[in-house]
Amino acid sequence: MNILRSLLTTQLKSSQKQTKNSGFTLIELLVGMVIAFLVITPLLGFMVSVLNTDGQEQAKATSEQEIKAALDYMTRDLQQAIYIYDATGIACLSGTVDASAANTCPNASTNQLPSPTGGVPVLVFWKRELVNQAITITATQNDDTFVYSLVAYYLIKDTNTNWSQAARIARWEIKDGVPNSAATVTCSGFTATDKYLPCPDKGFKPFDLSQKGLTLQAKMNSWTGGGSYDQVPVVLVDFIDQTTIAQGAPATATCSTNFIQVPATIVRSGFYTCVNSVSLNNRSAVEVYLRGNAQARLIQDETQVRYAQSKSSYFPTANIKVQGSSFIFTK
């Protein structure tokens, strides 16, 4: 009897272990899957929302940083300005004024600036450019000097797929060379008798203040280049708001007293200026306004990334006011 009881007990224990290790039933699996779906689906939606929000905030932060960096660069550029062209002056250089402006623009019929596709000149000025160690003092000693250069900033909106669906700002510059009678290289666009080291940029010509009976503005507006240029506008910053005022972009700010809005007629207010070419102390000053477009970093459809008041946080704005540190005196 004891032996039989022992065998039955052992068999029952073995049967119970097999029952416990037999796995899940189909109903248990289905219930588990439903519970997992109910738990994981909201978590996935939450994670997708977090990632989208992070991408949007990152796009906003990047646009703000780039706008600030662009304004910082322009500030350093403009601090060396000796003369900043107002709307009339830019129209003179661009050859876009009518015959009635002949007295103000002696060369109004020709374009003296590059014309990039979809580009509008917004900020054009002369400045003094430092050239290191360009003047020979002795066989072993050189000294720094300054040359004049002409700088132009453009607002460009085109269909170039290398850039965003928003607009961009490009910078163009040509500068003078340093006269050097010992130079042996003929500079491009100049005669062999013109001795420079380093050479002027091709097409550069200095402004002429010797003209009699003209105001400083008329003298500067009559500047003519030397023909074709080798330099091309280089993009400074992308993702500038391309929305036109007709499409709902904010109107321009009111310029300060004695400052003139540039361009005279603004289509896109993502980049414009207010200029005082000649103040009482003969110094030029400018107010620069920028508005970025962070949405264009997220959506590749120009019609979907236009300014709207409800999405104004995607369009960071900034402005500066700069006075040139140098000036031109002329009678």
Image (tube, rainbow, N blue to C red):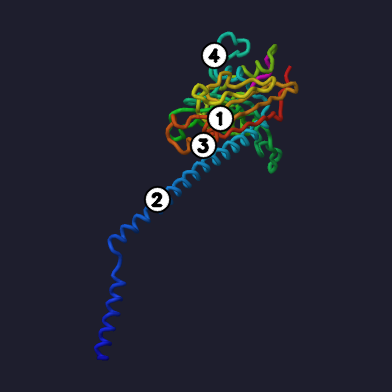
The residue pinned by badge 3 equals 294
Identify the magenta region: 206-211
Q: CA distance from mark 3 to mark 1?
A: 25 Å
Q: Is residue 9 above or below residue 205?
A: below
How far apart marks 2 and 3 lie (CA) works out to: 30 Å
Kindly identify the amino acid type of the residue bearing the numbered disc 2.
Answer: Thr
Q: CA distance from mark 4 to mark 1?
A: 22 Å
User: Magenta-highlighted stretch: main secondary structure?
Assistant: loop
Q: Quadrant of residue 132?
A: top right
Where disc 2 sits, the SS reads helix
Q: What x and y, as percent, mark residue 235?
A: 52, 34
Mark in the foreground, 1 or 2: 2
Look at label 3 and name its amino acid. Answer: Ala
Kindly identify which residue carries mark 4. Answer: 109
Sequence order check, earlier mark of 2 and 3 = 2
The kind of secondary structure element at disc 1 is strand
Residue that numbered label 2 is attached to: 41
Q: Residue 70 location in percent, x, y?
A: 59, 35
Q: Are marks 3 and 1 in contact (CB under 8 Å)?
A: no
Q: Which residue is mark 1?
A: 172
The answer to whether residue 262 is seen in the rendering is: yes
Eye-nearest disc, 3 or 1: 3
Q: How many marks?
A: 4
Instruction: Judge whether 310 appears above or below 99 on screen.
Output: below
Structural distance between the alpha carbons of marks 3 and 4: 39 Å
**Label 4 amino acid?**
Ser
> Which residue is painted at 61% across and 27% down in the image?
150
Q: Which quadrant, please, contains the C terminus?
A: top right
Disc nearest the viewer among 2 and 3: 2
